[in-house]
Amino acid sequence: MFCLKRFTKEQFAVQWEASREKYYRLAYCYTKNEQDALEILSEAVYKGYCHLHQLKHPEYFDTWMSRIIIYEAYRFLKQKKRWVSYETYMDVPDESMFRKAEERIDVYRYLDKLTADEKTLLILKYFEERSFKEMAEILSMPESTVKTRTYRLLKKIREEEAYGNESGAI
């Protein structure tokens, strides 16, 4: 008989502690406010801890917690009925994570204009530096769908940028 290995509450604490900064950055990308991000994390930790028995594969803890944090961020923003302004995003000093040519686009300027799903794609890809495979696991969709949606979104942003910029350069 096959027996699933249970993820203990001690392992939960160790895993959470090892990745808490990454989780904080993920929540902060949605709110751009320290207190709001901490509130999201507090709810996410509580829900993750309470539903630990539902984690079937301990090796997917990071994906599982990321998904919980994203859903909590959606819930929080919907509850607050506010989205972060462009000016708030411009306060972020470190833009070194944008490495490729396509990443030169002023992502911050576009985040406020995007739907929640589009925003999640950009945050996971460029702020969290997740692979398409990891994004697919977190979002519970095929990797090809994640790639297609991401590339379409980038194309849309490039077109808007080219339309708004007379030289057409991004």
Image (cartoon, grey):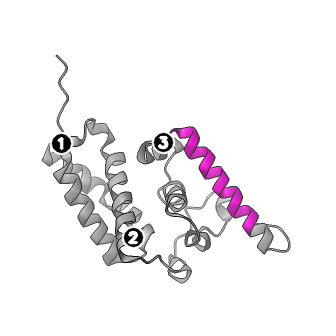
Above or below, comparing residue 8 to residue 155 in the picture: above
Above or below, comparing residue 13 to residue 133 in the picture: below
Tag 1's secondary structure? helix
Q: CA distance from mark 2 to mark 1?
A: 28 Å
Q: Which residue in the structure is indicated by mark 3?
A: 141
Task: Write the start and end of the magenta stretch as one range.
Answer: 141-160
Counting residues from the start of the chain, the first of labels 2 and 1 encountered is 1
Q: Residue furthest top?
A: 1
Q: CA distance from mark 1 to mark 3?
A: 23 Å
Q: Position of residue 9 (x, y in %)?
A: 14, 47
Above or below, comparing residue 156 to residue 3 in the picture: below
Crowding near the residue tagged with mark 2, few <14, some 14–19, many ≥20 C-alpha atoms within 10 Å: few
Q: Which residue in the structure is indicated by mark 2?
A: 78
Tag 2's secondary structure? helix
Residue at 19% over, 20% down? 2
Snapshot quadrant of residue 155 = bottom right
Task: Say which of marks 2 and 3 sits in front.
Answer: 2
Amino acid type of disc 2?
Lys
> Residue 35 in magenta?
no
Residue at 74% over, 69% down? 161
User: Observer-nearest residue: 17 or 59?
Assistant: 59
